[in-house]
Amino acid sequence: MSLFDWFANRQKSNSNDRDRHERDIAEGLWTKCEACGVLTYTKDLRANQMVCPECNHHHRVFSDQRIEQLIDAKTWVPLNEKLQPQDPLQFRDRKTYSDRLREYQEKTHLFDAVQTGLGKLDGFGIVLAVMDFQFMGGSMGSVVGEKLTRAIEQATRKRLPAIIVCASGGARMQEGMLSLMQMAKVSAALERHRAARLLYVPVLTHPTMGGVTASFAMLGDIIIAEPQSTIGFAGRRVIEQTLRQKLPENFQSAEDLLTHGFVDTIVPRTQLKPTLAQLIRLHQPQTVASHVIPLPQTSLPLSSTGTKRSHR
């Protein structure tokens, strides 16, 4: 081998090592912000709950991460985690609904688009439901509605606050009317929860749309939204095509909904857990004293009839 060949091979080897190193960086060590384009060390970004430190953009997170962010360590107890969806309509477009379900279950390691469970948030017992957008866009089918209903009923029985983190494109079209029925079913469970004078807080994240917005997402005692979340019923393009006019840039944003009174507050993800803890603390059931507190004795002597004598 000539000296020239040795240098050529070494240069090629160094180039391959550099390409491999750059791929390693791109695949996990660094994360590029979708909004401002700044590269952030992924470990630091996760420590900041996937919120960009430069522009405050909230990167999308999924149900496992939400549970980790909100629930105290080693207190999470899943509810109804083995419920699986069926294909009652034998729905088919390019693939059968059953095949799609199987693909998403393998990809996400979830049975459907929501996780529910009991846990403690800053020491307070709660029932938490977290919708997962990576499973068919967080769409609400029969299993999602059933798990949400059972979770709310569990909260009512145990007299606990209920919190639902919403992230959904709406009702699941592959289940037709059965998916739309879940809107009424979950809403009825929330009404029973409200009648028991218990707290319910929905957290609206990006995106919260369709039948989810039209039902339990907007039925909270206090409605919280994440910054820059898209919240609405019909999609922006559908509305523009129907009205035949351009909508404002901030239309259906959390900030726009706050201005018009559809949400109560916008809370950054890094402040969500302490905010929820404060709300739960303020809404703790008050116990009524079982004994009567004696009134202080009057300085005026009483007459034989029990009325105060006047001193003139």
Image (cartoon, rainbow, N blue to C red):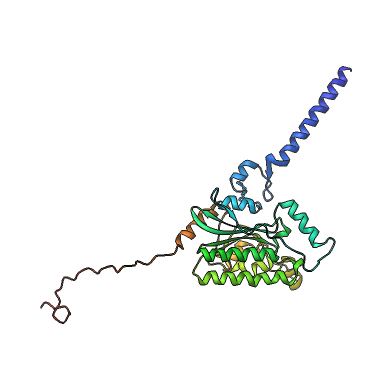
Instruction: Give 84 or 225, whichever is nearer the viewer.
Output: 84
The answer to whether residue 107 is visible is yes
Residue at 59 percent of width and 70 percent of height: 189
Residue at 52 percent of width and 54 percent of height: 121
Quadrant position of residue 98: bottom right
Instruction: Give 236 or 269, whichever is nearer the viewer.
Output: 269
Quadrant position of residue 139: bottom right
Q: Is residue 305 above or below residue 266?
A: below
Tell me how many marks there are: 0
Q: Quadrant of the C terminus?
A: bottom left
Residue at 84 percent of width and 21 percent of height: 7
Quadrant position of residue 96: bottom right
Taking 238 as reference, is 119 left or right?
left
Instruction: Give 26 or 172, whichever is nearer the viewer.
Output: 172
Q: Position of residue 56 (x, y in %)?
A: 61, 50
Q: Position of residue 261 (x, y in %)?
A: 56, 68
The answer to whether residue 252 is visible is no
Q: Position of residue 21 (x, y in %)?
A: 74, 34
- Of all residues, the one furthest to the top in this rendering is 2
Residue at 53 percent of width and 65 percent of height: 157
- Of all residues, the one furthest to the bottom in this rendering is 305
Q: Position of residue 70 (x, y in %)?
A: 56, 53
- Of all residues, the one furthest to the left in this rendering is 312
Instruction: Give 283 or 144, whichever is nearer the viewer.
Output: 144
Q: Is residue 63 above or below residue 158?
A: above
Taking 139 as reference, is 78 left or right?
left
Q: Quadrant of the N terminus?
A: top right
